[in-house]
Image (spheres, helix red, strand yellow):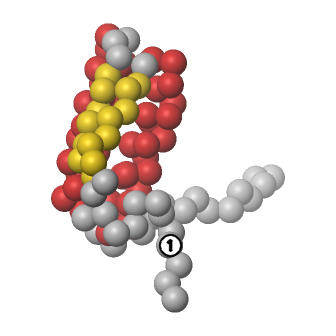
Amino acid sequence: MSCRTSILDGVDIAVLQSRLAALQQAYLDLSSGGKLEVVSYAQGDGNKSVTYSRTNIGALTQAIITVQTQIDSLNGVKKNRRAAIRPFF
């Protein structure tokens, strides 16, 4: 049995890239103008939409990072792990 590592497992990379572009545009629009932004998409069980406002730009940022991480995973990009902190004397 395989272990799921992301809620986005199984989503085609082309779909992820399309969603990423929409999320990033929504982020830019919110950052520059503070307006409401609606991101719509089609899913197997119907059409969905999410409305973001400046007050929840953090959730939008996290959604962007999640999609970027999944795309990187599908492209074989290894996570950039930081080295352990070592005291300097």
User: Across the whole image, how many numbered discs are drawn on residues?
Assistant: 1
Residue name at image x 46 percent, y 60 percent: 7
Mark 1 residue element:
loop
Q: Nearer the viewer, residue 33 or 4?
A: 4
Give left or right: position of 50 versus 4: left
Q: Nearer the viewer, residue 71 or 37?
A: 37
The location of residue 4, given as percent across then percent down, is 50, 72
In this rendering, the answer to whether 76 lies above or below 49 is below
User: How many neighbours does mark 1 have within 10 angstroms: few (below 14), some (14-19), or many (20 or more)?
Assistant: few
Q: Quadrant of residue 50?
A: top left
The location of residue 44, given as percent across then percent down, is 27, 57
Residue name at image x 74 percent, y 59 percent: 86
Q: Is residue 42 visible?
A: yes
Q: Is residue 23 visible?
A: no
Residue name at image x 51 percent, y 18 percent: 55
List the single residue furthest toward the front.
Answer: 45
Give left or right: position of 57 versus 19: right
Return the residue at label 1: 4
In this rendering, the answer to whether 39 lies above or below 35 is below
The location of residue 26, given as percent across then percent down, is 30, 28
Q: Quadrant of residue 34?
A: top left
Residue name at image x 48 percent, y 41 percent: 62
In this rendering, the answer to whether 4 lies above or below 15 is below
Q: Nearer the viewer, residue 72 or 55?
A: 55
Callout 1 amino acid: Arg
Give left or right: position of 3 versus 41: right
List the single residue furthest toward the bottom.
Answer: 1
